[in-house]
Image (tube, rainbow, N blue to C red):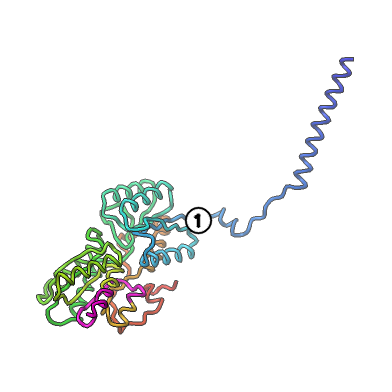
């Protein structure tokens, strides 16, 4: 009797297992399906995108947005994934932290403004050891292990500004320089180039060099201070994108457009407006869109193992009212966005 009960238990249990197995099998066949991958998804799996990061001096800045646009257009054209990360306002510590973070993320390349700080050089060496190429942009760091610099020859651009002042003015000139930041390497080069260009002309006297902290309000405050201290001033030179705009606002508020010569930097829309109306006489044109575009292309080449010349200078020139209007292609260094 016990043998019969045991046999019944075994048969019942076996039947339960069989039923469960059949249920699972037919359920899988009935409801399971393989997702269809799009051609784009299949391509992404066969060729992983390169991942680059652009780290500007500050995120919310019209000049750096032009750099970003060039980089994004190049990234889109070459099928590269690009991130735009960095400090909201110019801050070396935040800038360095961002570089350290993206290195830890093992990205395929970094585009960053050079920073005058020993820690910057340490981080660039760290990136090189991890086989992450670094391209400096706008501001170089030649003593670091960066692979290449893409951007303006800042000394030459300052020299061009000085030559423009000499060509555009006559007689004695008392000149004030408003610069973004005293310790920023590219700003120092723009100041030095200007000084060297006018050094042999006894009619030119540089009476002040003030800092704007690369803000328009900073340029306004600096220009006001200079005019109070030097009422016989005849000319201004602004070395960063917002300096000329800030200077122009002060000069207009004092109705001194006919008495003060202004040469600025870059071609932001407001700068061009002031040139058109005659408040700003000239501006040094660099090409941030071109910088961003070419920096991405240089990183692609570096990822392919190619060797590059360390200095990849982009175009620079001075424009006056007679050169307006400027075509979009000209504003992008001859490149179509």
Is 254 placed left or right of 137 in the picture? left
> Which image quarter is the C terminus in?
bottom left
Outermost residue, top side = 1
Q: Is residue 259 above or below residue 69?
A: below
Q: Residue at x 26, y 67 (%)?
A: 219
The image shows residue 198 at horizontal and vertical percentages of 15, 73
**As displayed, is residue 17 above or below residue 190?**
above
- Reply yes or no: does residue 72 show up in magenta: no
Quarter residue 236 falls in: bottom left
In the image shown, does 59 or 200 lie closer to the viewer? Answer: 59
Q: Secondary structure at mark 1?
A: loop
Give the residue number, with chain letter if any, for mark 1: 49
Q: Residue at x 26, y 54 (%)?
A: 116
Place of residue 270 in the rendered image (x, y in percent of width and height, measured from the top left) = 34, 75
Above or below, 48 against 7 in this view is below
Which residues make up the magenta segment?
A: 248-271
**Does 32 appear above or below 298?**
above
| Nearer to us in this view, 167 or 79 | 167
| Location of residue 87 in the rendering, given as x and y in whole percent from the top left corner | 36, 55
Q: Residues within 10 Å of mark 1 (few under 14, many from 20)?
A: some
Query: On the rendered structure, is 20 left or right of 254?
Result: right
Give the side of residue 24 with respect to residue 181, left or right: right
Q: Quadrant of the N terminus?
A: top right
Identified at 45% across, 58% down, the residue is 82
Image x and y of residue 265, in percent: 28, 71
User: Camera-side residue: 123 or 249?
Assistant: 249
In which quarter of the view is residue 280 placed? bottom left
Q: Residue furthest left?
A: 202
């Amino acid at each position: 009797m016990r043998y019969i009960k045991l046999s019944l238990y075994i048969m019942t249990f076996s039947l339960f297992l069989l039923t469960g197995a059949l249920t699972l099998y037919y359920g899988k066949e009935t409801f399971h399906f393989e997702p269809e991958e799009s051609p784009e998804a299949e391509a992404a799996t066969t060729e992983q995108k390169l991942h680059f990061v652009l780290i500007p001096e500050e995120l919310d800045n019209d000049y750096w947005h032009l750099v970003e646009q060039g980089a994004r257009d190049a990234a889109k054209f070459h099928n590269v994934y690009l991130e735009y990360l960095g400090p909201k306002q110019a801050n070396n510590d935040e800038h360095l932290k961002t570089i350290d973070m993206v290195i830890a993320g093992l990205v395929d390349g970094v585009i960053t403004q050079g920073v005058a700080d020993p820690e910057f050089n340490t981080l660039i060496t760290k990136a090189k050891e991890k086989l992450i190429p670094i391209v400096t942009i706008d501001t170089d760091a030649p003593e670091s292990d960066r692979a290449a610099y893409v951007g303006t020859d800042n000394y030459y651009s300052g020299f061009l500004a000085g030559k423009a002042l000499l060509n555009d003015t006559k007689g004695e000139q008392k000149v004030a320089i408003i610069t973004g930041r005293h310790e920023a390497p590219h700003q120092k080069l723009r100041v030095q180039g200007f000084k060297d260009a006018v050094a042999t002309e006894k009619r030119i006297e540089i009476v002040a060099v003030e800092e704007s902290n690369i803000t328009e309000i900073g340029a306004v405050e600096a220009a006001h201070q200079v005019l109070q201290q030097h009422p016989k001033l005849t000319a201004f030179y602004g070395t960063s994108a917002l300096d000329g705009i800030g200077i122009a606002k002060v000069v207009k508020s004092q109705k001194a457009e006919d008495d003060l010569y202004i040469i600025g930097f870059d071609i932001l829309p407001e700068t061009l407006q002031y040139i058109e109306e005659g408040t700003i006489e000239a501006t040094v044109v660099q090409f941030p869109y071109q910088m961003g575009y070419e920096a991405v292309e240089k990183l692609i080449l570096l990822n392919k193992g190619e060797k590059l010349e360390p200095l990849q200078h982009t175009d620079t020139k001075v424009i006056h009212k007679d050169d307006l209007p400027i075509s979009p292609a000209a504003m992008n260094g001859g490149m179509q966005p």
